Amino acid sequence: MSETIPYIPPKVWKWEQPSGGQFANINRPVSGATHEKDLPVGKHPLQLYSLATPNGVKVTIMLEELLALGFEGAEYDAWLIRINEGDQFSSGFVGANPNSKIPALVDTSTTPPTRVFESGSILLYLAEKFGAFLPEDPAARTETLNWLFWQMGSAPYVGGGFGHFYFYAPEKFQYPIDRFTMETKRQLDVLDKTLAERPYIAGDDYTIADMAIFPWYGGMVLGRSYDAAEFLSVHEYKHLVNWAQKIDARPAVVRGRKVNRTWGDDHEQVPERHDAADLDAKQVLESAAE
């Protein structure tokens, strides 16, 4: 029987071969643009450059929730960034986000236009700009921001950790899968115990904390992430599941989840959104499908 030869890290790491896996063609150890290309600009005050991953969906949910409240200034153009094709490495996108990650937002209503990157920063920017979904009371505001930053710090263990080694990695290894499964379940338990005591993540009101956490953790317990619902025994987290179902049923969430989406059923895909009618047309198709 052959023995596995343990990997011994070199004294100095060098990038000598692709990392393997689904994203090997875009992973690299340097930043910056790979090609010259300007970002398109539409007619609305807010220009979003994104893809309907959990981080991207946070922002489209927020924008649709703002529009549902009647904030006309929240109208937006959502441009598709195909990360598998390297759109995020264009000179225009790097100008909007030097970290080359979606989503990126440009607010053209300011002079000069304001760039906003990192999904949590975008949620906070929009909440402060429109005075919505972020409590004014200092204690409630702080609790909301506690959970917003909790999500930003915790989700990489779920995505880059559990999601990568359980779902995307070309080879499966027990140690990283066990390590990140344990941490993912711990985080689910944190949320479940919190939601046993309150209707929303930060308290009695629906806030940007819910919008940040739902696409990641709501998606997991609703069976939409990494085909891992059974593996993670998500039925154990009853309060979290109930909260996720409640958020998932919100009309603005239904709309926001479709924007910049290029997979799934056709009526769920709105690769680019430049007007509310783009989503309304898909709603008609969805109704017909039912």
Image (cartoon, rainbow, N blue to C red):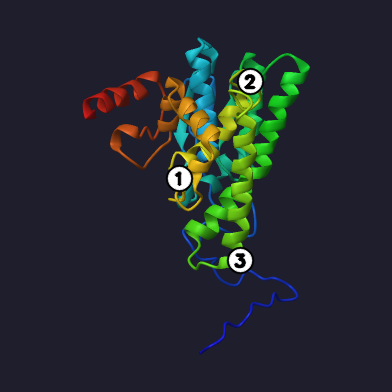
Nearer-N-terminus badge (3/2): 2
Q: Residue at x 61, y 41 (%)?
A: 189
Amino acid type, residue under disc 3 in the picture:
Tyr
Q: Quadrant of residue 203?
A: top right
CA separation in Å, label 3 and label 1 = 32 Å
Q: Which residue is identified by label 3? A: 175
Q: Residues within 10 Å of mark 1 (few under 14, many from 20)?
A: some
Label ID, residue 82: 1
Does residue 183 show up?
yes
Residue type, label 2:
Ala
Question: Mark 3 against mark 1, which lies toward the viewer?
Answer: 3
Pick whichever of labels 3 and 1 is earlier in the sequence: 1
From this view, report whether residue 1 is shown above or below residue 168: below
Whether residue 117 is visible to the viewer of this picture, yes or no, is no
The residue lying at 59 percent from left, 42 percent from top is 188
Task: Provide residue 66's location: percent of width, then percent of height.
Answer: 53, 17
Specify the label residue 90 is tagged with.
Answer: none
Q: Are marks 2 and 1 in contact (CB under 8 Å)?
A: no
Which amino acid type is shown beneath numbered disc 1? Arg
Q: Is 88 or 58 nearer to us in this picture?
A: 58
Q: Which mark is residue 127?
A: 2
In this rendered view, identify the residue nearer to me: 117 or 142: 142
Which label sits in the foreground, 3 or 2?
Answer: 3
